[in-house]
Amino acid sequence: MSSDDSFDTEHQFDDDDDSLDAYVWQLFLMINPGDDDSAFQQFAAYREVVADTPEDDINVAEVVGQVADWRAAFRVEAGDTRALVQAIEELASRWNIDIDWDGDVDEDDFHADVDTSDLLGVAYDNLAPHGYTLWVLDTDDDSVAGWITLSRNVEPMRELATELGVHLHRGNETG
């Protein structure tokens, strides 16, 4: 029996399942659109990290960010525009999308004249025509974190985030 088979047998989530695991599984499916294998791997890593943690003590956004970092999520220091560009480009490359940053991201002058809010807005605007939405999470520190979903999942993402206690907004709503 493959690990996928044991997951399917052990954790068949139906539409009425309101367990934390069911919601987190849906989140991994949304942030890995069209890539169920990656969603499964990240979900398995999530379950390993939270194995002995009481549900009420789990910070879903933090753990998801940890296990999906630079594969389906990102977290960078707020002022690190270079890392933000690299992280978003890495995520967008999964769908062969190139972000037009309105400048040369390899030049120091570009980064001196731009902040993370500007970059998030540009990335959001570049992803939208391809059917993707950039989400930014509220963090408790000086970092910028988020993920990308299909644009058709805007309302389901908002509803799921509410269920998970994750505070987020679209990338064009920063600043």
Image (tube, helix red, strand yellow):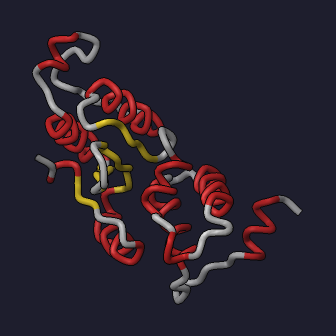
Looking at the image, residue 165 sits to the left or right of residue 10; the answer is left
- Which residue lies most toward the bottom here? 16
In this view, the residue farthest toward the right is 1
As drawn, 17 above or below 127: below
Name the spot of residue 94 as percent of width and height, x first.
48, 38
Where's the N terminus, which quadrant? bottom right
Indicate left or right for 81 with 51 as reference: left
18 sits left or right of 40 in the view: left
Q: Residue 77 at x, y = what percent? A: 32, 36
- Report how many numbered discs are placed on residues in the image: 0
Residue at (51, 68) in percent of width and height: 58
Residue displayed at 75% across by 76% down: 10
Name the foreground residue: 116 vs 130: 116
- Residue 9 placed where, x, y %? 77, 75
**Residue at 30% of width from left, 55% of height from top?**
140
- Kindly indicate the quadrant of the structure image that contains residue 46: bottom right
Residue 149: image x %, image y %? 38, 55
Quarter of the rendering containing residue 138:
bottom left
- Placement of 129 over or under 97, stated as above or below: below
The one nearer the camera, 173 or 94, is 173
User: Looking at the image, is 11 positioned above or below residue 104?
Assistant: below
Q: Residue at 84% across / 59% down in the picture?
A: 2
In this rendering, is residue 138 above or below 78?
below
